Amino acid sequence: VFYSVLAGILWAFGPLGKRYGAGGAEEGMRAARSACTFFVYNLATFLPVLCLVAFTALTGKLSAPVERSWLWRAPVVLLCGIIGGLGGVLATYAFALAGENESSLLSMVENGLYTAAGALLIGLTYQERLTNYQLGAAVLMILAVVCAYAA
């Protein structure tokens, strides 16, 4: 749970960076600015991964050949990454289109739906038995997003 909490705190800087890069674009430049913002954002997210791979390689933990069973997972991971990337592009473009005082609401809507839908997709895909509390929390999260948007 510790790493999940830490990840959530660190991920909070993602929407801030996207809003900062894409926000305030003039009418004809919104798509271009959001594309540039998302490109730079994704380049930056690659740096920690590169450092982790370099560290594991230097410590000798990456010298073993990749499991053959994992190679069959790579296309699914790639497809999920493409779909998630499209969501990221749309989220960044939404920041470019946002009016005054709408950015935090957009971030809450995107991340609330992302969190609830992601948890439900994982639960369904891996046939995890979701408790009533988990399902109730997902429903409450979605209701909170809808109520915030309606206000």
Image (cartoon, rainbow, N blue to C red):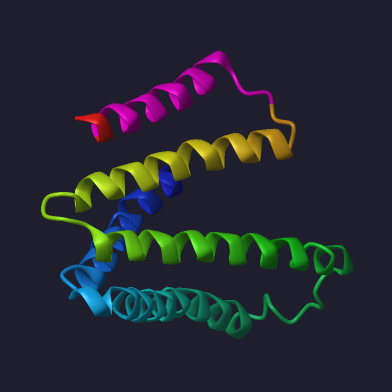
Q: Please give left or right for residue 130 compared with residue 140 in the image.
A: right
| Quadrant position of residue 122 | top right
Q: Where does residue 89 sit, x and y in percent of width and height?
A: 43, 66
* Overall secondary structure of the magenta section: helix
Q: Where does residue 14 sit, x and y in percent of width and height?
A: 32, 62
Q: Which residues are magenta?
A: 129-148
Residue at left offset 44%, top offset 49%:
3
The residue lying toward the viewer, choosing from 34 and 62, is 34
Q: Residue furthest left?
A: 100
Residue at left offset 60%, top offset 64%:
81
User: What is the number of callouts on the image?
Assistant: 0
Establish if 63 lies above or below 141. Answer: below
Establish if 84 lies above or below 136. Answer: below
Residue 101 in magenta?
no
The residue lying toward the viewer, choosing from 97 and 65, is 97
Residue 144 in magenta?
yes
Establish if 8 lies above or below 93. Answer: above
